[in-house]
Image (spheres, rainbow, N blue to C red):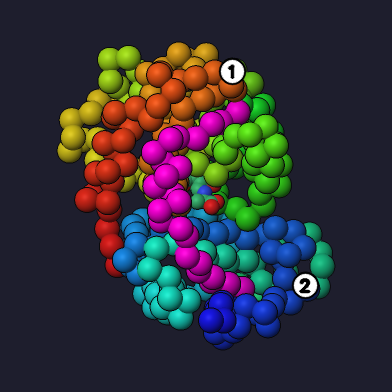
Amino acid sequence: MPRIAYVNGLYRDLRDACVNVEDRGYQFADGVYEVCEVRGARLVDFSRHMTRLQRSLRELRIAEPMPVAALAIIMREVVRRNRVTYGMVYLQVTRGVARRDHAFPPNPVKPSVVITAHALNYEKKQQIAATGIKVITLPENRWPRVDIKSVSLLPNVLAKQQAREEGAYEAWYVDRDGFITEGASSNAWIVTADGRAVTRSVDVGILAGITRAVLMDVMKALQISLEERPFTPEEAREAAEAFVTSATQVVMPVVAIDGQVVGNGQPGGITRRLREEFHRFSAFS
Ligand code: PDD
């Protein structure tokens, strides 16, 4: 079955789908993106992802390429054409095509839109969640505007690769004050010995994860207390539980940090419960 991508108005076979070599996304990473989980062939928490997309675009002064309702139709169509029931849909919007010059094009150009979707292996994901993942910590080396979901991800790419080479799945950044900010592609959490979930506040140093936000609703409903504050790698290694959140990992247990086991080395009870309950609280469209 051919894979299909939406590229600037056309549904194309992935092998033929291409963007202009002078697209500013290609030349300057001048663009933003969103990733939504797909479950039962439906988009998870689509509206919240679109609100964040609009904010990212505004912050970079890139025009909205089309109304959210139109994006919804196209994203669902890409999911349908690729027959994804469980997986992810990726949306990228760049400033558009213009002769190479760092400053914005003097005459506004149309933003470029690319949408792809692919299936993920549900059983495999569940198996990984059953044993948990390992993380490493690294010095924070990204730009300060990580609140914008920019396609400029080189530090994240290098961090993930280092994690992989060290036998881990995710890398947690540590800021200059010695506190964990977030993962290379996820938000970072711990659970204290007395059962409080802790994650950094969105004020500075992290992306406002949609999974993070929905999980806070889950916690409220399950009466799990929440603390939004920074925490150090030492506190994380000594924590009862740890986990990461993202659209594709949902709630993924962390069982080792920098080679040191967290808790008893198994996914924690609160983490497992949050993972199991998560989709009762997410919106499907
Ligand atoms: N990453 N922090 C970073 C740096 C991320 O890249 C992501 C998501 C998150 C979690 O955000 P959300 O819960 O909205 O997915 C936090 C996506 C999944 C990716 O780049 O593939």
Residue behind label 1 places its C-beta within 8 angstroms of ligand 1 = no
Q: Nearer the viewer, residue 14 or 263?
A: 263
Residue 204 on image: x %, y % = 51, 33
Crowding around mark 1 (Cα neighbors within 10 Å: few <14, some 14 to 19, many 20+) is some
Q: Is residue 262 left or right of residue 272?
A: right
Task: Tell me, yes or no, whether the highlighted magenta stretch contains residue 202.
Answer: no
| Callout 2 touching callout 1 (CB < 8 Å) | no
Crowding around mark 2 (Cα neighbors within 10 Å: few <14, some 14 to 19, many 20+) is some
Label for residue 178? 1
**Does 116 sit above or below residue 177?**
below
Q: Amino acid at mark 1?
A: Gly
Label for residue 22? 2
Q: Nearer the viewer, residue 256 or 59?
A: 256
Residue 9 on image: x %, y % = 55, 84
Label for residue 221? none
Tell me what residue is drawn at x 55 percent, y 44 percent. Answer: 185
> Could you give the CA–CA distance between mark 2 and mark 1, rounded to whole angstroms?
40 Å
- Image depth: mark 2 or mark 1 in front: 1
Q: Amino acid at mark 2?
A: Glu
Dot 1: what SS? Answer: loop
Tell me what residue is drawn at x 63 percent, y 55 percent. Answer: 151
Tell me what residue is drawn at x 18 percent, y 35 percent. Answer: 222
Residue 87 in view of the camera = yes
Please report the bounds of the magenta region as a residue range.
112-136
**Does 210 sit above or below residue 108?**
above
Quadrant that contains the C terminus: bottom left
Residue 150 on image: x %, y % = 60, 53
